[in-house]
Every structure is written in structure tokens, then in C-alpha cells.
Image (cartoon, rainbow, N blue to C red):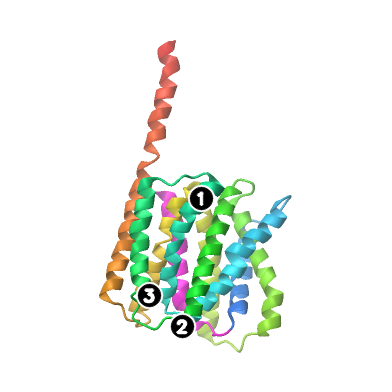
């Protein structure tokens, strides 16, 4: 339960990013926005846990930094600027299905029938919300959000597969730094520099770099290190729930009855899956007790 709560910090923070980016971050600068999110976030974590990549982690940091940070953040910023926060965050709810499928061949985690059922409940709610949005849908924004979901799912599974080679904070820090450094020359060449920022925009960038990046990524990869990928993916359903609630309560976006039903299904799927996840450790414990008792009985 503890690691589930820690992991939940990430999707809640990421769900709020759609609203913050849409309302406070200057538009038309997705590359600079992604760079100013990733690089400061990584440097904050490096200040907490100084270290450098060793051996294969030089190239693994670049791979994970591209999938989970660099290209991912550009696509997220594009989606946030072109879609309502409720719709952009909901598309990301499809990631549990991708994580379930990728975890089997890449991380040797075979999905259980109950895990698939929980994912199906939550994802059906997400699809219901996506396809019944009350505002016009920008196809480019949908494509950007879907591509971000696919790339990050692959990156998360690779990070889990390579887990244990370095500690979580160091791994997360160098993913963010690598992604930020890869973005910097492209961002400056393509977009120049940001226009003058007011206080709200500066506060928005600080929030995204500290809370929605440094803290959120550290929480997320800690969850991947301690929980099955299927459980982590389903916790990610809090992302669209947060985006919908913020978009409706603060941004004044319209929410249809069908979207409310979809939101309820997302919550039900999350609760169902976490109940199952909480029950799973009991079986090995009973087996361990039987194994430990056998030598004593034999003696």
C-alpha cells in the first residue's frame, strides 16, 4: 500500500500539468517548455543524489531520456496546447493496456485475468470520456497524446527491466538530464527563446519542474521498482481523473453525463486493481511458511 500511495503522486501531478500548461505556460514553445521542465528537474534530483552514469548506463540514460523525457515531453506540451485538459489527460489512460502487454515479453510479468479485468474497466471509462468529449477535437493533439503514451509505456518497461543497476534517484535524475540536454540545441534552434514571462508563467514553470517532474518522476520510478508494471499502470488512471476534475472545477470546461460515467469507471477499475494487488503478496507468504516448516517436521 505504501508504494501504491507513493506512486500515486506522479499521475496526480501529471494530471495537473495539463491545466497549468494550458492556462499559464506561453503557447507555441513546446520544445523550450519541455527542456525547461526536464533539465531543472534532473538537476534538482542530482543535487539530492550526486553521481554519474557508469558502464552501460551512459547509453541507457540516453534511451530512457529520449522515450520518457525528451520526445515524450514535447508531445505532451503539444497535446496540452491543442486539447482541453480533460481530453488530453484521458488519452494517457490507455497506457495501462500497453504496459500490460509490454510487461509480458520485456519484463517477464504475465498479466493475470483480474489485472486485465481491472484495466478493461478503467480503460473503457477512459474511452467513453474520449469519444464523448463536448468540445471539438484537434486530430494533431490526439496523435501527439497517443504517441506520447506509446513511447512512455515502452520507456517505463525498459526502466523496470534495467532496475537494480543503479538507485532510483540517480536513474531518474540522469533520464531527466539526458532528455533535457537532447532537447536544448533543438529547442533553441527551432524556437529561439521564450518571450518575457510574467509572474504566473514563472510560477507555472517552477511548479512543473519541481512538482510535476522532479518529485513526480522519482515517485513513479520508485513505484516501478517495487510494484508490478500492471499495478503501476493502473495507478496512472489517476492522471485523467485529476485532469478532468481540474479542467471542470477550475478551467470551466464542460463535462457531459457520459464523461461522468467514464470517470466513475476509471475510479472503479483503479480500486478493483489495487484491491487485487494488495491481496497478491499473501500467497507467497503462506508458501514460505510451509517451506520453512518442512525441515522442522522432518527433523
Answer whether residue 243 is magenta in the image: no
Q: Verify CB contact (< 8 Å) between mark 1 and mark 3.
A: no
Q: Quadrant of the C terminus?
A: top left
Horizontal side, residue 22 vs residue 120: left or right: right
Q: Secondary structure at mark 1?
A: helix
**Pointer 2 or 1: first along the chain:** 2
Corner quadrant of residue 253: bottom left
Horizontal side, residue 25 vs residue 5: left or right: right
The alpha-carbon separation of the residues under discs 2 and 1 comes to 36 Å
Corner quadrant of residue 174: bottom right
Residue 181 is situated, as x and y percent measured from the top left of the image, at 69, 69
- Badge number at residue 246: 3
Can residue 211 be seen here? The reply is no
The alpha-carbon separation of the residues under discs 2 and 3 comes to 11 Å
Q: Verify CB contact (< 8 Å) between mark 2 and mark 1.
A: no
Q: Residue at x 32, y 55 (%)?
A: 271
Residue 60 is situated, as x and y percent measured from the top left of the image, at 67, 55
**Pointer 1 or 3: first along the chain:** 1
Q: Verify CB contact (< 8 Å) between mark 2 and mark 3.
A: no
Q: Residues within 10 Å of mark 2 (few under 14, many from 20)?
A: some
Q: Secondary structure at mark 2?
A: helix
Residue nearer the viewer, 104 or 35: 104
- Badge number at residue 23: 2
Region rendered in magenta = 1-28
Q: Which mark's residue is nearer the viewer, 1 or 3?
A: 1
For label 1, the residue is: 103
Amino acid at each position: 500500500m505504501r508504494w501504491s500511495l507513493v506512486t500515486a503522486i506522479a499521475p496526480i501531478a501529471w494530471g495537473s500539468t495539463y491545466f497549468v500548461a494550458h492556462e499559464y505556460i506561453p503557447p507555441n514553445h513546446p520544445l523550450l517548455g519541455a527542456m525547461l521542465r526536464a533539465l531543472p528537474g534532473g538537476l534538482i534530483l542530482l543535487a539530492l543524489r550526486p553521481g554519474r552514469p557508469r558502464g552501460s548506463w551512459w547509453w541507457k540514460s540516453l534511451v530512457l531520456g529520449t522515450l520518457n523525457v525528451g520526445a515524450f515531453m514535447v508531445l505532451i506540451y503539444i497535446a496540452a496546447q491543442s486539447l482541453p485538459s480533460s481530453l488530453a489527460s484521458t488519452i494517457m489512460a490507455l497506457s495501462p493496456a500497453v504496459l500490460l502487454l509490454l510487461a509480458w515479453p520485456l519484463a517477464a510479468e504475465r498479466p493475470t485475468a483480474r489485472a486485465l479485468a481491472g484495466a478493461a474497466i478503467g480503460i473503457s471509462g477512459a474511452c467513453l470520456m474520449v469519444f464523448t468529449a463536448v468540445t471539438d477535437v484537434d486530430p494533431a493533439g490526439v496523435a501527439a497524446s497517443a504517441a506520447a503514451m506509446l513511447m512512455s509505456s515502452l520507456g517505463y518497461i525498459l526502466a523496470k527491466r534495467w532496475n537494480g543497476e543503479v538507485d532510483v534517484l540517480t536513474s531518474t535524475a540522469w533520464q531527466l538530464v539526458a532528455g533535457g540536454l537532447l532537447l536544448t540545441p533543438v529547442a533553441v534552434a527551432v524556437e529561439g527563446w521564450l518571450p518575457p514571462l510574467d509572474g504566473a508563467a514563472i510560477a507555472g514553470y517552477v511548479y512543473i519542474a519541481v512538482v510535476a517532474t522532479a518529485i513526480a518522476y522519482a515517485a513513479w520510478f520508485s513505484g516501478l521498482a517495487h510494484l508490478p508494471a500492471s499495478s503501476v499502470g493502473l495507478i496512472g488512471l489517476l492522471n485523467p481523473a485529476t485532469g478532468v476534475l481540474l479542467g471542470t472545477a477550475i478551467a470551466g470546461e464542460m463535462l457531459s453525463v457520459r464523461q461522468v460515467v467514464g470517470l466513475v469507471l476509471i475510479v472503479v477499475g483503479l480500486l478493483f486493481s489495487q484491491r487485487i494487488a494488495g491481496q497478491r503478496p499473501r500467497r507467497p507468504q503462506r508458501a514460505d511458511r510451509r517451506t520453512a516448516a518442512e525441515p522442522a517436521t522432518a527433523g
